[in-house]
Amino acid sequence: MSCQVTLTPSGHQFNAKEGETLLESAMRAGLSLPYGCRNGACGACKGTVVSGQVRHGDHQPSALTDEEQAAGKALFCCAYPETDVTLEVREVLSGKDIPVKTLPCRVQKIEKPADDVAVLFLKLPATERLQFMAGQYIDVLMKDGKRRSFSLANAPHDDEFLQLHVRHVAGGSFSDYVFSSMKEREILRFNGPLGTFYLREDSTKPIIFIASGTGFAPIKGIVEHALHEGCDRQMVFYWGARQPKDLYMFDLALKWQAENPNLTFIPVVSDATPEDNWQGRTGFVHEAVLEDFKDLSGYQVYACGAPVVVEAAHTSFTKTRNLPEDEFFSDAFFLAKDLKPKA
């Protein structure tokens, strides 16, 4: 049995098939809703059930609290309609016509700018190009059927190779493979593009970018796209890391700043040692933003990296610096072991 889904305020309608989540059914209908992990972990797809009933599959309590659920909130990536429903949601209109594909690719090159970071350059077949928006991600399809999500670190105009930044996580099946045995010219398969973490180009507001660790990857794609398009909005990029060596493309960020007067780069290190001789900002990256900005009501913020960083930035910026909720865009990097399977 299918259920009819109505979106407000747009008025768009579609049918959700039995066993299909609200997000899956919307995507099948060619409509784009905000989403990130698609596994009930990040909360990016959260919206309001105005009328009707839904049931939830497994999800992280931090992504949807009991109080939020009681107030009518739902995670569309793991919510299944049990009746006809009306949802209040801010649709993503740009990029909705981009097809999601499953494609093969060849590992053209592997670089290691840091001891625990590998940069993969993936080459598509000669007859294929991946249409995507800067900041989106792809799912690498592993032989055991599992997926591993990685943000695209290149901008759409620079698409000879798809670029992924892989941090080595002890015990991580894919990252262990990358660092121990992956060879150039190997063939991988992936599905994408996915996600709604990309630059809202219809805005003229100044931008604050925040990255922690390899959360730099999608920020890199977005910044390079903005600069390529001649974006003249003021941009401040904060990159947080434990030690200076973890800022693995430091010189590239400095180059952006040197060549573009509307972009400022602020690296922030939390655990520098005396041997590092670090002369820059210290502490947590979101706290550096709080120190520099007393009012964010006129800004957009794009944050990517460890969940604790993204969550701290969202809470502090919206609660203490007047940042509008709908001007905070995020992509939190969860480890596979932290995610629960879909129902």
Image (cartoon, grey):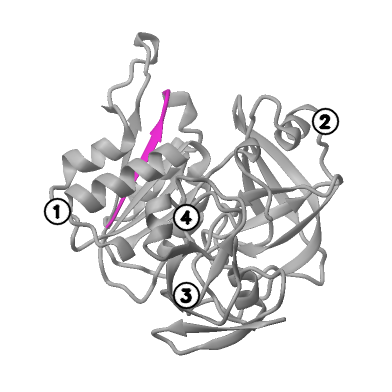
Q: Are marks 1 and 2 in contact (CB under 8 Å)?
A: no
| Distance between the alpha carbons at the discs numbered 3 and 2 | 39 Å
Q: Is residue 206 above or below residue 108?
A: below
Question: How far from the left and from the top, in percent, is residue 224?
Answer: 47, 58
Mark toward the viewer: 3 or 4: 4
Q: Are marks 1 and 4 in contact (CB under 8 Å)?
A: no
Residue located at (43% from left, 87% from top)? 10
Question: In the shown orientation, is residue 237 left or right of residue 181?
Answer: left
- Which residue, given by chain and number where applicable, does mark 2 sit on? 181
Looking at the image, tell me whether mark 1 or mark 2 is earlier in sequence order.
2
Assess disc 3: are there few (<14), some (14-19) or many (≥20) residues with their C-alpha within 10 Å of its C-alpha.
some
Q: Is residue 188 above or below residue 336?
A: below
Q: Amino acid at mark 4?
A: Gly
Q: Secondary structure at mark 1?
A: loop
Residue 15 within the segment the image draws in magenta = no
Which quadrant holds the N terminus? bottom right
Q: Amino acid at mark 2?
A: Ser
- Which residue, given by chain and number where applicable, does mark 4 sit on? 43
- Which residue, given by chain and number where applicable, does mark 3 sit on? 92
Q: Main secondary structure of the magenta part?
A: strand
Which quadrant holds the C terminus? bottom right
Task: Looking at the picture, tell me which residue is in the foreground, 195 or 88.
Answer: 88
Q: Which residues are magenta?
A: 235-243
| Distance between the alpha carbons at the discs numbered 1 and 3 | 26 Å
Q: Is residue 133 above or below residue 161?
A: below
- Which residue, given by chain and number where applicable, does mark 1 sit on? 295
Q: Are marks 2 and 4 in contact (CB under 8 Å)?
A: no
Looking at the image, tell me whether mark 1 or mark 3 is earlier in sequence order.
3
| Distance between the alpha carbons at the discs numbered 1 and 2 | 49 Å
Looking at the image, tell me whether mark 3 or mark 4 is earlier in sequence order.
4
Mark toward the viewer: 3 or 2: 3
Question: In the shown orientation, is residue 275 left or right of residue 290?
Answer: right
